[in-house]
Image (spheres, rainbow, N blue to C red):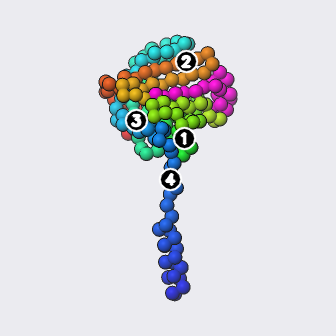
Amino acid sequence: MSFFIANLFVASVCFAQVQSAPLVSIPSQDGFFERISQLCGQAFAGTVVVDNQPSDAFSQPLKMHVRKCDEQQLQIPFHVGDDASRTWIVTKTGSGLSLKHDHRKSDGSHDALTMYGGHTLDAGFEHIQSFPADEYSKQLFSKLGYPQSLGNTWQMYIYDDVFTYRLVRQGREFRVDFDLTKPIALPPTPWGYAD
């Protein structure tokens, strides 16, 4: 019996010493992540300031909502008029930051073109991070017939008065600026999510 108790004591001491590995990150990315986190629970109106291939799709009112924030992930729905299909997801990965585009249908199911995005390749800056297309996205673009998107890089800028979402690739630039000085009424819950 004493042998069993001794082993149980050793096991409990070892278990008490086990801790989760820390999620490592660097100051520039932490600063960027924190700047966005400070906007959590607020929404802002946006304006297309650059679009060299204009589309009626973005002629509707544009809104971003920093909807959900924790220590590892930010969820930011991007509403275009009544279209609540898009959510940007910024995640700390331990080797940088990931940006994913969660696209949903109005019934909440995933669109075929979803969860594409990129991962930081360098430190970036407290105000600016770039996300070149990752391998998953390149495979998805190729499979679905969007070869022009293989060279996509998404960028996000955050300053005291403006948040910018920008897409660039050869021959293409799209940029939306959101006015952080004037919070707006919160938009509806994005498709496929729950409060």
Taking 52 as reference, is 156 above or below it?
below
Q: Is the residue marked by circle 2 packed among few (<14), some (14-19), or many (20+) residues within 10 Å?
A: some
Give the mark, 3 or 1, whose residue is nearer the N terminus.
3
- For the residues marked 4 and 3, what is the alpha-carbon distance in whole angstroms? 21 Å
Question: Position of 69 compared to 143: left or right?
Answer: left
Q: Per the image, is 156 magenta?
A: yes
Taking 78 as reference, is 7 above or below it?
below
Q: Quadrant of residue 120?
A: top right
Q: Classify mark 3: helix, strand or loop.
A: helix
Q: Nearer the viewer, residue 122 or 105?
A: 122
Give the mark, 2 or 3, whose residue is nearer the N terminus.
3
Q: Per the image, is 30 magenta?
A: no
In the rendered image, which residue does mark 1 sit on? Answer: 96
In the rendered image, which residue does mark 2 sit on? Answer: 173
Residue 136: % across, % down: 63, 35
What secondary structure prevails in the magenta region? helix
Q: Residue at x 68, y 28 (%)?
A: 142
In the rendered image, which residue does mark 4 sit on? Answer: 22
- For the residues marked 2 and 3, what is the alpha-carbon distance in whole angstroms? 25 Å
Can I make out residue 147 in this image?
Answer: yes
Report how many numbered discs are placed on residues in the image: 4
Q: Which mark is residue 3?
A: none
